[in-house]
Image (tube, helix red, strand yellow):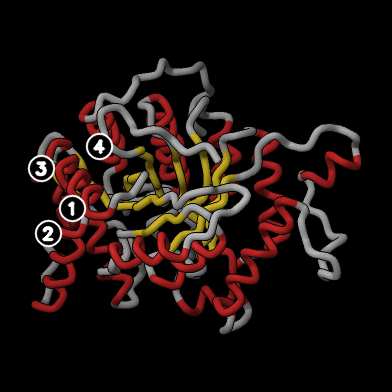
Amino acid sequence: MQFGRPSGTAAFTLSVLSAGGTGVGMTAEEGLASTISLARTADRRGYHRFWMSEHHAMGATSVSSPPLMVARLIAETTRIRLGAGGVMLPNHSPLLIAEQFGMLEGLAPGRIDLGLGRAPGTDGATAAALRRGADANDGFPQQVLELLGFLGDKFPPGHPYRHVHAVPGPWQARENRVPPPSEAPEVWVLGSSPYSAQLAGQLGRPYAFALQFGDADIEAAMCLYRESFRPSDVLAEPHTLVSVPVAIGDDPAEAKRQAATSAMAMLRMFKGEGYLLLPPDEVEAYPATIQERQILDAYTNRSFHGTAATVADRLEALHERTGVDEVMLVVGGHSASLDQRGIALIADQYDLPYLSAPLLPAAL
């Protein structure tokens, strides 16, 4: 596995995650173009990874298929690792995901990540339409094992899929009498609970903890992951990543307004009104009840918002508290331009290398 070194002067590796934000007043085409532009910026500014999350039936995001976006971004970037953070595996066939990410690895060897989650990435009715069953989560560990079997073309004797092969992959190389792929997609287990931490440790896979969701106990999850870790053929020691919601700007007040747009989207989701990124002025004018104000304030304050120096202080405190190897900045407020500016400011804060822009086609 190709883990990054500490980024610039930071004590940890820095990466970026986008949900393909499409705020109110923005078309899907504009939201996708902004995601492409954000990935280009992350690539030029020396970030290690750029991931996208899978969501369905949400007005605030246009990325329902991270693999499709990864395919586009391969041609838009030059060095940054690209991936899904993540693919919600119970929504899909493990064989299909193995085929898709085998293709992506063939297009960009050594640059593809595959983060696996078990949440549906949507509401209950949409999840039912995707999964066609209420017990989809129950088989997640078995699905992960099947996916790993397809990616490595390794199933034990007698396994029902022993003679089923994901193409592209090692089996195709043997059939065509060529060397096997030198790289494979880097598989991560994602989550925000002890369940995912223990599974990642038992499988000997890197673990990514989503701090943007609720008040999950990251210290307990990291401790459980490290205690349950078993070395595997791809990872000798535990490796951890934490994703944190950020809103970074030159003006701390404007950064907080940006964070509040994401908080309002969460409140709307809790109320069954749909996850939308409303303009900051509309969020400020909302006549919240006392209980709603508590939710809005909690999610706004959970976001690491402010100037680059302020956010860096919080990132460093989090690193000291958890000992994580990588920190992933989750962007996705109403303003795509502030997201762009924010990751550039953090890159400057930590003296990340500025890479010259490649000659690439215009986005969309």
Q: Which label's residue is closer to the chain start, 4 or 1?
A: 1
The secondary element bearing badge 4 is classed as: helix
Where on the picture, by quarter, is residue 138?
Answer: bottom right
The secondary element bearing badge 1 is classed as: helix
Q: Residues within 10 Å of mark 1 (few under 14, many from 20)?
A: many
Residue at the bottom extreme, as displayed: 134
Work out how far the residue at label 2 is from the one at label 1, CA to CA, in angstroms: 6 Å
Residue 338 disc label: none
The secondary element bearing badge 2 is classed as: helix
**Position of residue 232 in the picture relative to residue 358 (left or right):** right
Work out how far the residue at label 3 is from the one at label 2, CA to CA, in angstroms: 16 Å
In percent of width and height, residue 116 lies at 53, 59
Work out how far the residue at label 4 is from the one at label 1, CA to CA, in angstroms: 17 Å
Is there CB contact under 8 Å for labels 3 and 4? Answer: no
In percent of width and height, residue 148 lies at 67, 57
What's under tag 1, amino acid-wise?
Answer: Pro
Q: Look at mark 1 in the image and give the residue it sits on.
A: 280
Q: Which label's residue is closer to the chain start, 3 or 4?
A: 3
The secondary element bearing badge 3 is classed as: helix
Is there CB contact under 8 Å for labels 4 and 1? Answer: no
Is there CB contact under 8 Å for labels 2 and 1? Answer: yes
Q: Look at mark 4 in the image and give the residue it sits on.
A: 342
What's under tag 4, amino acid-wise?
Answer: Gly
Q: Which residue is pictured at 52% across the width and 29% down the height?
A: 76
Q: Which residue is pictured at 67% across the width and 34% down the height?
A: 107
* In this view, 179 is above or below 323: above
Q: Look at mark 3 in the image and give the residue it sits on.
A: 252
Q: Look at mark 2 in the image and give the residue it sits on.
A: 284
